[in-house]
Amino acid sequence: MKFMKIGTKPDTFYTEEATRYNKCDYPYFTQLATITSFKSNRVGDWQRRTVISDIPSDLTIRINNICYLLHKFPLVPTCGLLQRLCSDSEDSDIVIIDLHDIPGGEDAFELCAKFCYGITISLSAHNFVPAFCAAKFLRMTESIEKGNFVLKLEAFFNSCILEGWKDSIVTLQTTIKLPEWSENLGIIRRCIDSIVEKILTPPAKVSWSYTYTRPGYVKKQHQSVPKDWWTEDISDLDIDLFRCIITAVRSTYMLPPQLVGEALHVYACRWLPDTTKSRPPQSSGSLTEESMKKSRRILEFIVSMIPADRGSVSVGFLLRLLSIANYLGASPVTKTELIRKAGLQFEEATVGDMLLPSQLSSDQHYYDIDLVSAVLESYLVLWRRQSPASAENSHLLRSVRKIGKLIDSYLQVVARDVNMPISKLVYLAEALPDSARGDHDGLYKAINIYLKEHPDLSKAEKKSLCRMLDCQKLSPEIRAHAVKNERLPLRTVVQVLFFEQESGSRATGHKPELISKARQTQATEEEGDKPQQEARRRNTVPESSEREHHEKMKSLEGKGVRGNIGEAESEKGKERRGEANSASKVDPKKIVQRRSRSDQGHDKGRER
């Protein structure tokens, strides 16, 4: 940061003890009441500021609650405004002037007064704006006196502030206290032009200091300057000033959209609440209404400024913004736009990007599964719009298969949430089209985890959860696990067994005697057969199905097709199936009988 010292004399301003008075205590108040348009009838405590001098004070300047006891010389010859006001005083010995509306207040006026007295003052980017505005207000220009304060301030502004990087940013930030004056005097425009010019400078030519605190970055002497070196420093600006910078940068079309997106990302991390680590408190008093309003304004601006180019910001950033939008209660337009943008890049997401806590205090579950469902629906709308009757190896198929694996992996995580409603899990799992899953292994794992973490599910709930599984799309290893899985409904286990027997028969060249009962399950349920409907309500297999199954097994045994079908196979075939053969060795009859007894015992326990 650069600074400039003006003047050589020591500081002789000091504060006298407070004095309470009104106009009646000073007869000359009434006589001088007409000398200026800056009139005041304030009565109260005044803080008296004066300067050490052998000459008695003959000029009183009142600003807010401070009363300056000064001298006409040297102030009046330097300040055009004071010249005009004192000329109306009719040669009174003591002149009192109220300057309550001076820009920058008493601090800015004192800088100007010290300049007049020749007292040393230090100017920097932090106090330039109020000093310059106050000097303009007092008309301390060259037309009043040569080498006046305004001229020196302009020289400092041009040669030091605008030439520096951080000086320009600090000066621009201080203009928020005097926006109208700063705009009229051209301070804001010139600072923005200087900042944008430096942002557009090639990184190899950046020679000024900057702030860069990215994780893992260690600044070395000969290390190249990162392309986004400027993003952190401008994130300190007020939202309106930051918007002006970003708008000016984008209008040049000289920077890639990824850099603009990174600047928006840094600003969002700087000013928006972090909703990724914990759920909001039950009460909404954590943020005041004013803070919420300001955050919503920042969020809406960031969303509106995200470049349309795909990849300008990451999908993880978009999902976090959507979570923040839910927390702040942003407008539906903002949420819809975020969902649309996230849907366009959804296949780039990771499970970690999607693990966001719910922002509704009414939700008992931790993870915001509704957010993921909304983005998935947006993705599928675009996918179906683009999807023709394409070949199996098309890009669209690979894209939706990637999404399918992503959703199944996400389901495996949220299934561990003990408060996650089964309806939300099923809704998200069923939202994917059939072509999105090349296999159902990931879905089976999610279901198994949910059953393990929610042991008190009813039979109907277990049935609704497991009906999504397609046993034909399970790998041999998963089928072997499912056959022995005590958490699965009996009907699901039977379906897996039939498919296992059928696949084993095909492997040895034998045709199965009966069509797999698993394929007929759905059709049978739709026919509305009363005995089977009653059996389904009890979550057991109908007696007729069990008899057919036993007859089928006897028929298979008579033909020599037993669980160990692999006797007719080569040793290579045995090794390839591995655990699949171990599942086929299980006697389905014993499985059904054992599970039936277990379910009956469970029902009696629940009745008691």
Image (cartoon, rainbow, N blue to C red):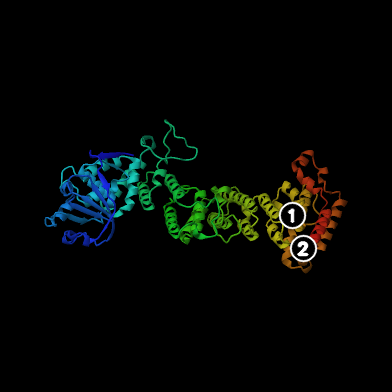
Q: Residue furthest top?
A: 222
370 lies left or right of 508: left
The label nearer to you, 1 versus 2, is 2
In what quadrant of the picture does the C terminus appear? bottom right
Measuring 63% from the left and 57% from the top, which residue is drawn there? 420
Q: Where is residue 463 in the image (x, y as percent from the top left)?
A: 71, 60
| Amino acid of disc 2 | Arg
First in residue order: circle 1 vs circle 2: 1
Mark 2 = which residue? Answer: 606
Residue 127, percent from left and from top: 30, 46
Image quarter in which the N terminus is found: top left
Above/below status of 223 relative to 442: above
Q: Nearer the viewer, residue 556 or 578?
A: 578
Asked whether residue 394 appears in the rendered view, the answer is no
Look at the numbered disc 1 and give the secondary structure of its residue.
loop
| Secondary structure of the residue carrying numbered label 2 | helix
310 and 211: which one is in front?
Answer: 211
| Mark 1 surroundings within 10 Å by alpha-carbon count, few (fewer than 14), some (14 through 19), many (20 or more) | some
* Residue pointed to by mark 1: 487
Left or right: residue 208 versus residue 78 is: right
Residue type at mark 1 is: Arg
Q: How far apart are marks 1 and 2 (CA)?
A: 16 Å
